Amino acid sequence: MSTAALVFVYGTLKRGGWNHRWLNGAPCLGAASTVECFSLYAHHYPFLVREPRYPVRGELYAVDAVTLDNLDRLEGHPDDYQRQRIPVRDAEGGMVEAWAYLHSHPEGELLPDGEFLER
């Protein structure tokens, strides 16, 4: 039996997003937000960048190793997005370490706050 990994998603992997199916039915542990401040850019999909502006809001999932490998392929890790551990505040206000996919440089329009909403 494989150990679950926590993954923070902030874009098209969220419930209702066009890439949500890549989570393979992994349990959603609820709303979450980054503890540190980041910037969120978007054109067709979002880019989480280490520029301190605001906490980013998303969802927390417990995924198995196969799903994590699939997410790495989807996100182009490590050549496009880089999977990194970051502190995340869960729905109850507790702090956990979770994987998140960060981009090395901004692309698209800077979002005014820390949430990506698909249009």
Image (tube, helix red, strand yellow):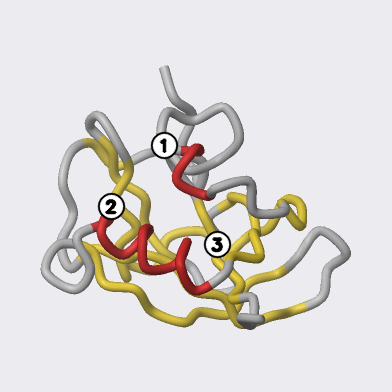
Q: Residue furthest front?
A: 1
Identify the element where label 2 is drawn: helix
Residue name at image x 45 percent, y 67 percent: 66
- Relative to 40, say whether 118 is above or below: above
Quarter of the image where one finds residue 64: bottom right
Disc 2 marks which amino acid? Answer: Leu
**Which label sits in the foreground, 2 or 3?**
2
Of mark 1 and mark 2, the one earlier in the sequence is 1
94 vs 61, left or right, is right
Q: CA distance from mark 2 to mark 3?
A: 15 Å
Identify the element where label 1 is drawn: loop
Of mark 3 and mark 1, the one earlier in the sequence is 3
- Relative to 25, say whether 49 is above or below: below
Where does label 1 land, which residue?
19
Where does label 3 land, which residue?
8
Q: Are marks 1 and 2 in contact (CB under 8 Å)?
A: yes
* Residue 87 percent location from the top left of the image: 59, 80
The quadrant in which the C terminus is found is top left
**Which label sits in the foreground, 3 or 1?**
1
The mark found on residue 75 in the picture is none
Where does label 2 land, which residue?
74
Quarter of the image where one finds residue 8: bottom right
Residue name at image x 37 percent, y 39 percent: 111
Disc 3 marks which amino acid? Answer: Phe
91 vs 18, left or right, is right
The quadrant in which the N terminus is found is bottom right
Disc 1 marks which amino acid? Answer: Asn
Identify the element where label 3 is drawn: strand
Q: CA distance from mark 3 to mark 1?
A: 14 Å
Instruction: Decide: few, some or many residues near mark 2? Use Cα within 10 Å; few <14, some 14-19, many ≥20.
Output: few
* Residue 82 percent location from the top left of the image: 26, 72
- Relative to 28, say whether 36 is above or below: below
